[in-house]
Amino acid sequence: MKVMYKHPAILGLALKLIGMSSTETQLSGYKALLLFAPDYLNCSFLFNGSIVKTSGLMLKSISLLILFSLMSGCDSGGSNTMFFDAKLSKLGEIEFSSPAFKTGDLIPIKFTCYGDDLSPPLRWSDVPGNPRSIAIIMDDTYLSSKIVRHWSIYNIPIATLSLKPALLSRQQIENTFMQAENDFEHYGYTGPCPPTGEEHEYVFFIYALSQPLDLSGTSGPTQLTNAMQGYVIAYGSFSGRYVGN
């Protein structure tokens, strides 16, 4: 599965979240598989045999194949080095899309704040391996300073292969589905809402996890990301765009 992102800033953002601060990079012109971890981590990764470190803002012309793998191996002190080679990755791939729009296309207005602000329908292929739950995340990648979390839903049963549109904005839906708080401080989906004239890209990620997540009490973007760390066994992604009215 190859997902090409129009905005190269997403790689820089993810590298910045990992905590890399050097301006060294050998990624220009390549497709990169990226280890994305919580923002308190300080890591590096191996790409085509070379340790890569970058500030992210130096990466202005990268064709990006991003892997939001959330695997463990670094600590808050930055003492460990995480080696990650795309060729050695054992993660499975999930075909992931929406029947409401094609990847890279404009998201219909009814799924945005300019319309009804409904969550879009999603669908995916059978999950490889032996997963025990599924999690889905939607992020706005426009800002150079941070990634904005619009939606997180987790503990989806593995037999489920789709989500219907217009899910309720509450912590628990269905029997086991749970939604974390987004960066707008409420549970469930908040649709695209870029300022007038700005085009933002919204990336949808799906993760097959080796165990259900136990997030007691308030669960925000950071708590969910941390809880998934080390349990991802397969992934998929696609993106959509929206221009502020």
Image (spheres, rainbow, N blue to C red):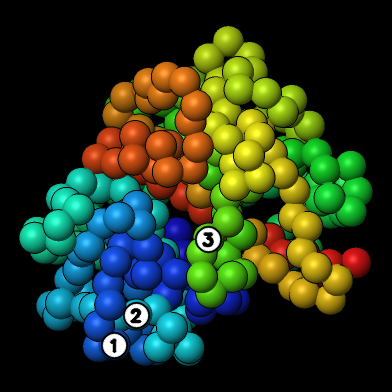
Quickly name the residue at label 1: 23
Q: CA distance from mark 3 to mark 2?
A: 15 Å
- At label 2, counting other C-alpha atoms closer than 10 Å, the crowd grade (few under 14, some 14-19, many 20 or more) is many
- The C terminus appears in which quarter of the rendering? bottom right
How far from the left and from the top, in percent, is residue 36? 35, 58
**Residue type, label 1:** Thr
Task: Name the N-terminal-most of marks 1 and 2.
Answer: 1
**Residue type, label 2:** Ser
**Residue type, label 3:** Ile
- Identify the residue at horizontal 32%, vertical 24% (top origin): 211
- Identify the residue at horizontal 40%, vertical 88% (top origin): 58
How far from the left and from the top, in percent, is residue 106? 78, 63
How far from the left and from the top, in percent, is residue 193? 78, 57
Quickly name the residue at label 3: 147
> In the image shown, does 125 or 207 lie closer to the viewer?
207
> In the image shown, does 3 or 79 lie closer to the viewer?
79
Label 2 secondary element: loop
Label 1 secondary element: loop
Circle 1/circle 2 CB separation < 8 Å? yes
Task: Name the N-terminal-most of marks 3 and 1.
Answer: 1
Q: CA distance from mark 1 to mark 2?
A: 5 Å
How far from the left and from the top, in percent, is residue 200? 69, 68
Circle 3/circle 1 CB separation < 8 Å? no
> In the image shown, does 162 or 53 lie closer to the viewer?
53
Label 3 secondary element: loop
Side of 88 where 98 appears, left or right: right
Vertical comparison of 170 with 196: above or below: above
Q: Which mark is residue 55?
A: 2
